[in-house]
Amino acid sequence: FDFTPPIITNETENIMVSEFPVAAAITEPTCQGLADGIIDLDFDSEIFQYFWNGEAGTSPYTAAAGSYELRILAPSGEQVFAGEYQVGEPDALAVQADITPEINMSGDGMIVLAVSGGTGVYTYSWAFDPANTTNTLSGLTAGTYEVTVTDENDCSTSIIVEVDRLVNTGELSLDQQVIVSPNPARDFISIAFTENVSFDQLQLFSADGKLQRAYINGQ
C-alpha cells in the first residue's frame, strides 16, 4: 500500500500529521525462547518517539515472541499512530527415538531419530560416533547414547537414549536336571548340570524370590 509520511515543517511545533498506516517487516527469533526477533517499521524519523508496550524504544525494535503495542508520538506529545504487531517464533526442537534393543549380546541394537520443530535441515552429532552425522546409529550394544540435534539457525537440543538388551530364554527339560549345592548356602554354591547345557544368561534367586546372582555366558 502507499502512504504519505508526516509532513514536517521547519518549525517543530507546527508539525503536520495525517492518519497513515505503519507497515513493518517482522523477523522471528532464531530459536524458541530467544529475544532476537526484529520489528522494522516502514517509517523513520528521529524526531518522533516510539513506545512499545508502554516503554520507550526505537525502530528497528528487538523482540521475543509476543504481542507488541506501538504508539508513535510527535515532539508535541500528540499521538500520531497506534497499532499492534505480532511476533511469532519457531517451534521448539523435539526429538523422538525409535530404539531397537540388542539381542543376545550380538551388538545389533539401533537408534533412529525423528525430529520436529526448529528451522530448516537438521544435523546430528553422536558422542559415541562423532563421524556419524545421520539420524541413525546402528551396531549398538546395550548402554546409553547421547546425541545433539542442531537446526539451520544453530538451535540445538540434546537427549540421552538407552538401548536395552534382550536375551532369548528357554526352559530346561525335565531330564536336564540342575544340581545346586549346598542348599541352603551362605557364601558359596556349586551349580552342576546332568548334561551339557548352553545358555546366555543364568539367574540365581533365593527362596524369597530375590535375585542373588546373574551369570552371563558362563561368567
Image: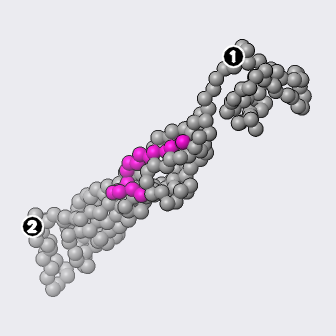
Q: Position of residue 195 (x, y in %)?
A: 76, 22
Q: Position of residue 173 (x, y in %)?
A: 69, 16
- 1 vs 2, front mark: 1
Identify the mark at residue 2; answer none if there is no mark.
Answer: 2
Q: Categorize mark 2 by other alpha carbons within 10 Å: few (<14), some (14-19), many (20+).
A: few
The residue under the point 56% across, 55% down is 128
Question: Can residue 169 be seen here?
Answer: yes
Q: Is residue 117 magenta?
A: yes
How many numbered marks, from 0 up?
Answer: 2
Q: Categorize mark 1 by other alpha carbons within 10 Å: few (<14), some (14-19), many (20+).
A: few
Question: Does 133 appear above or below 11?
Answer: above
Residue sitting nearer the eye, 83 or 218: 218
The three-letter code of the residue at mark 2 reads Asp
- Left or right of 80 on screen, residue 178: right
Q: Residue furthest top?
A: 174
**What stretch of residues is rendered in magenta?**
108-123
In the rendered image, the quadrant that contains the C terminus is top right
The three-letter code of the residue at mark 1 reads Ser
Q: Residue 63: which quarter of the image? A: bottom left
Q: Is mark 2 on a helix, strand or loop?
A: loop
Identify the mark at residue 173; answer none if there is no mark.
Answer: 1
Q: What element carries label 1?
A: loop
Q: Position of residue 213 (x, y in %)?
A: 77, 32
Question: Does 106 appear above or below 170?
Answer: below
